[in-house]
DNA sequence: TTTCAATAGTTGTCAATGCAAATGTTGTGA
DNA sequence: TCACAACATTTGCATTGACAACTATTGAAA
């Protein structure tokens, strides 16, 4: 069978990814939060304090973009950014109480959209999709 | 189980999508083509002439962005853009010979990356992922 | 038919993004 | 310990991209 762009994996991935981010982004906007911001908040909530580089890798947000994004969240009192004592280059990024509270309010919205997305699909099928997406990611990084 | 962002479907989708676009985009850059440009070219190649709105829906590129993107490709002689006779509002967008030729050269690169991405994964598993991504997309549009 | 709403596309403006250069800090070999 | 490479983050600058406003054309109601 010849290659058909509109049936390719990248096409389907992009289409779903864009749509999901659009919908979720609309809802986040009510809280003056963007999707990349949410990614940062959610990772910090789940994984605890991180350096900028770590956070960049975990959120797939480019370093310079993330640096400014974090700056904004610091100004809004949602994030704390401190140079650590042991190594003056490294920065420790963590949620404040306000940041934790806001993230806790936003997570149900994320869950809601994940539920909408996976309606009528078996739990084990979603698990399988995730497993394959992890494999694909590993392939791309090899 | 509590919701874990770094195990959520959106997380995996975004991660793979960004990585794939990065890698493919690097290769396209040698031809002065961006990923959104390639999407437009590939859709036109596969589906034939389209209006701007149709092309926007098929490529998931925003209208105003696409308008300028198409403008650029017209200047480079890869695309033809003509107002149709029956309806002066509508624009007919199609590949030129040069556009067809270039797209034919780029498609193997897309196929190459799809192969890299799916290495070691069974054909039927990829088919299944695509099927589920289509379902998810439908859920999001309902 | 005339007016007004709807449609299709383009352009103005400004925020978001990313690369590359700059800053500041730590590690390392002579 | 001194010079310099490597590292972590930030900032300058130029591009991209999106929303909203605008233009042009068509359809539809009065």
Image (cartoon, coloured by chain):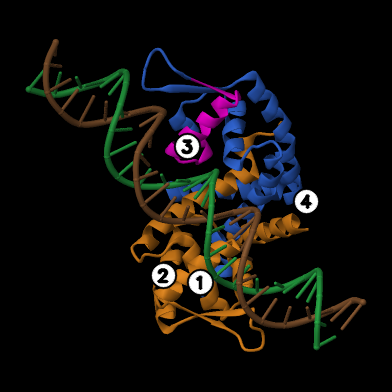
Chain colours: A blue, B orange, C green, D brown
Residue B77 placed where, x, y %? 40, 78
Q: Which residue is mark 3?
A: A57
Name the disc covering residue A119, or none.
Answer: 4
Residue at (65% x, 34% y) in the render: B4
The subunit letter for the residue under badge 4 reads A
SS for callout 4 = loop
The subunit letter for the residue under badge 2 reads B
Residue at (69% x, 58% y) in the render: B137
Cα distance, mark 1 to mark 3? 31 Å
Residue at (50% x, 29% y) in the render: A71
SS for callout 1 = helix
Q: Which sits earlier in the primary sequence, circle 4 or circle 3?
A: 3
Q: Which residues are magenta?
A: A57-81
Instruction: Tell me whether marks 2 and 4 sit on the same chain.
Output: no
- Image mark count: 4
Q: Which residue is mark 2?
A: B106
Q: Quadrant of residue B64?
A: bottom right
Cα distance, mark 2 to mark 4? 36 Å
Cα distance, mark 2 to mark 1? 9 Å
Q: Which residue is mark 1?
A: B42
Cα distance, mark 4 to mark 1? 31 Å
Pick the front one: D25 or A142: D25
Cα distance, mark 2 to mark 3? 29 Å
Q: Residues within 10 Å of mark 1 (few under 14, many from 20)?
A: many
Asked if A93 appears above or below B30 in the picture, the reply is above
Q: Quadrant of the N terminus of chain B?
A: top right
Left or right of B31, for residue A37: right
Circles 4 and 3: CB atoms closer than 8 Å = no
Residue B18 placed where, x, y %? 50, 50
Left or right of D7, for residue B112: right
């Amino acid at each position: 069978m010849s290659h058909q762009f509109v049936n390719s994996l990248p096409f389907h991935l992009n289409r779903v990814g864009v749509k999901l981010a659009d919908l979720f982004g609309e809802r986040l906007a009510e809280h003056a939060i963007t999707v990349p911001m949410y990614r940062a908040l959610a990772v910090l909530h789940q994984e605890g304090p991180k350096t900028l580089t770590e956070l960049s890798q975990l959120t797939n947000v480019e370093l310079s973009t993330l640096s400014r994004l974090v700056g904004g969240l610091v100004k809004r009192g949602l994030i704390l950014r401190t140079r650590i004592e042991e190594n003056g280059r490294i920065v420790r990024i963590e949620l404040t109480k306000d940041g934790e509270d806001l993230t806790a309010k936003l997570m149900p919205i994320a869950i809601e959209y994940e539920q909408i997305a996976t309606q009528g699909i078996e739990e084990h099928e979603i698990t399988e999709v995730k497993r394959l997406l992890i494999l694909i990611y590993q392939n791309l990084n090899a």
